[in-house]
Image (spheres, helix red, strand yellow):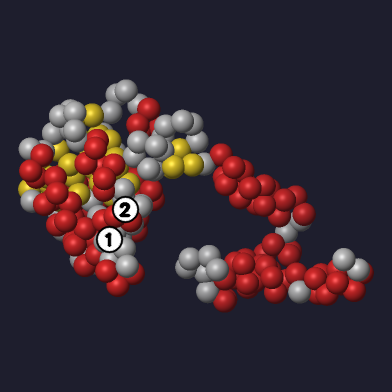
């Protein structure tokens, strides 16, 4: 690559940063500008730490082969914890929902992350989710209750209804988190108190 190409690339460095930041969820053009200008004003070491943190998390974090939450060791911290109640599995849509429930301190069982929710509009059905793996985890009879903790929106309710129908014939109790959360609300944005009450007041399906 010649010097002219390098100069052209350098000239567009800020725009490339703005474009990449703008691709992040929840980051609009103004937020992207604020972050970019903060990085420009920061010293090189701060920018290097951020870049290294991003590279490190991509290198060491993977999906737990049992529950599909995030893990840095072979299993995630919850699956590896012998002190967890193995008679309960709480089913959530995404790994971030595990973090939200763990913050409450109100639940001490295991988790299963679906990797999304059923959404015909987006062409996502049960086959695209970790439903088969969930059913396999119920085969040994150790699990007595499955708590369905998908969001209380249309897709979350559709997913919960589908799972309840699939699990009930296996003789496992199926419960749904209570609507102490606002209808249409996301678990990850719920305060700990509301989410803890929704877990404690779960109802049978």
Q: Residue at x 14, y 49 (%)?
A: 166
Instruction: Answer whether residue 165 is visible to the viewer in this image.
Output: yes
Viewer-closest of 84 and 93: 93
Query: From the viewer's perspective, is residue 123 above or below residue 113?
Result: below
Using residue 54 as the reference point, say whether residue 200 is left or right of it. left
| Residue in view at x 59 percent, y 42 percent | 59
In the image, 128: left or right of 143? right
Residue 124 in percent (x, y) is at 31, 63
Farthest residue toward the top? 82
Quarter placement of the N terminus: bottom right
User: Pointer 2 and pointer 1: residues touching (CB < 8 Å)?
Assistant: yes
For the point 49% across and 42% down, the residue is 62
Between residues 152 and 133, which one lies in front from this camera angle?
133
- The numbered mark at residue 129 is 2
Count the marks: 2
Say what secondary structure mark 2 lies in: loop
Q: CA distance from mark 2 to mark 1?
A: 7 Å
Taking the view exactly as shown, the residue that stands out farthest to the right is: 3
Q: Which residue is mark 1?
A: 125
Q: In the image, what residue occupies the spot 26% across and 56% down?
A: 126
């Amino acid at each position: 690559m010649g010097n002219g190409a390098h100069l052209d690339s350098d000239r567009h460095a800020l725009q490339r940063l703005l474009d990449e930041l703008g691709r992040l969820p929840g980051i609009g053009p103004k937020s992207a500008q604020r972050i970019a200008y903060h990085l420009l004003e920061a010293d090189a070491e701060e920018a290097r730490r951020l870049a290294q943190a991003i590279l490190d998390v991509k290198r060491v974090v993977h999906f737990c082969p049992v529950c599909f939450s995030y893990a840095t060791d072979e299993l995630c911290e919850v699956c590896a914890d012998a002190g967890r109640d193995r008679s309960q599995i709480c089913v959530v849509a995404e790994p971030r929902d595990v973090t939200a429930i763990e913050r409450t301190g109100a639940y001490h069982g295991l988790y299963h992350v679906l990797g999304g929710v059923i959404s015909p509009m987006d062409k996502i059905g049960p086959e695209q989710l970790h439903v088969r793996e969930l059913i396999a985890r119920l085969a040994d009879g150790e699990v007595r209750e499955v708590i369905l903790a998908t969001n209380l929106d249309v897709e979350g309710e559709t997913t919960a209804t589908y799972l309840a129908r699939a699990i009930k014939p296996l003789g496992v109790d199926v419960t749904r988190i209570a609507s102490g959360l606002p209808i249409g609300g996301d678990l990850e944005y719920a305060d700990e108190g509301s989410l803890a009450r929704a877990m404690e007041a779960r109802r049978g399906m």
